[in-house]
Amino acid sequence: MWVMWGLACALGMGTVDVISKRALREFDPWIVGTARLGCALPALAIPILIAGWPPLAPLFWKTVALMVPLEIVAFLLLLEALRAAPLAETVPFLSLTPLFTVVASWLILRERVTLLGLAGICAIVAGGYTLYGHELRHGALGPLRAMGRSQGTRLMIVVALLYSVNLSLGKQAVQLSSPTMFPGVYFAVLTTVLILIHLARGCRPAAFVHALRQRPGLLMSLGVMDGVTFLIHSIGILLAPVAYFVGVKRLSAVVSVLIGGILFRDAHLRLRLAGAGCMVAGVALLTMGA
């Protein structure tokens, strides 16, 4: 059952990344970021109205307080990475998150991964290496050097590390509240903090309103899709260890590489799809390991 939730989350996240890349061609990252979070709030309010507001322990708010700074930094770096490089050079490196999550979830939640599950995670990481396989003409370290030269790749690796911590904290927050309430509350807090940061930097709210009027379909669909995807994530993450669920969720890289290659004409599409295939094999190992 959790695999189906993970696949739905992967499809949603891959779509969100593609729409974000499209939006970043027209608008600044702060406008796209505000749209992703703020435009999701109406959709995320519906589950709360239906399921109600559960009692919350003080530990819930402490967990959210720990998550918000990491999430904001990771979110802004993610948007900058998407703007700086093709999708195929950025999004797939979020596949490093499950590897980092193995350590983080063990430290925070005391969850353990079987050897077969760990092999699946390593296969997903190997797929990331394959994405730069065209650089092997410069030697075995060619792909690694290319990764180092790409600003988008460097930023996304940092994002993966930050998310590896927040994903484990996020599961704890869902356990302390509910999967229908947490997404709405979390997005509301993140939106508020993001707006305050942008106001402190001198960004004008009127610019966001103008952008929303100019491209309502693009920005609203981005927010709704992001909100629904996070709701699916919050439900699915309760059904499996964090590292397993995130491993399946990171199949979003397959969606991003494929759609990005077609829409944005990214180079080396075949090789990058081979890397994505390696990730699929890793997910199969994860499923058997679970």
Image: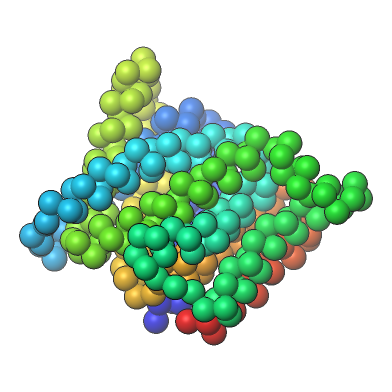
Taking the view exactly as shown, the residue that stands out farthest to the top is 202
Which residue corresponds to the image point at 75% horizontal and 59% vertical from the top-left? Answer: 130
Residue 114 in percent (x, y) is at: 52, 78
**Total of numbered circles in the picture?**
0
Image colouring = rainbow
Q: For this view, does 69 lie left or right of residue 153?
A: left
Q: For this view, does 60 lie left or right of residue 269?
A: left
Residue 213 seen in this snapshot: no
Q: In which quarter of the image is residue 228?
A: bottom left
Residue 173 seen in this snapshot: yes
Residue 64 in percent (x, y) is at: 25, 47
72 vs 165, nearest the viewer = 165
Residue 59 in percent (x, y) is at: 17, 53
Vertical placement of residue 257 versus 40, above or below: below
Which residue corresponds to the image point at 16% horizontal and 58% vertical from the top-left? Answer: 48
Taking the view exactly as shown, the residue that stands out farthest to the left is 55
Which residue corresponds to the image point at 32% horizontal and 71% vertical from the top-left? Answer: 238
Taking the view exactly as shown, the residue that stands out farthest to the bottom is 288
| Quadrant housing the N terminus | bottom left
Residue 144 in percent (x, y) is at: 76, 47
Q: In which quarter of the image is residue 76?
A: top left
Q: Quadrant of residue 22?
A: top right
Which residue corresponds to the image point at 29% horizontal and 44% vertical from the top-left? Answer: 66
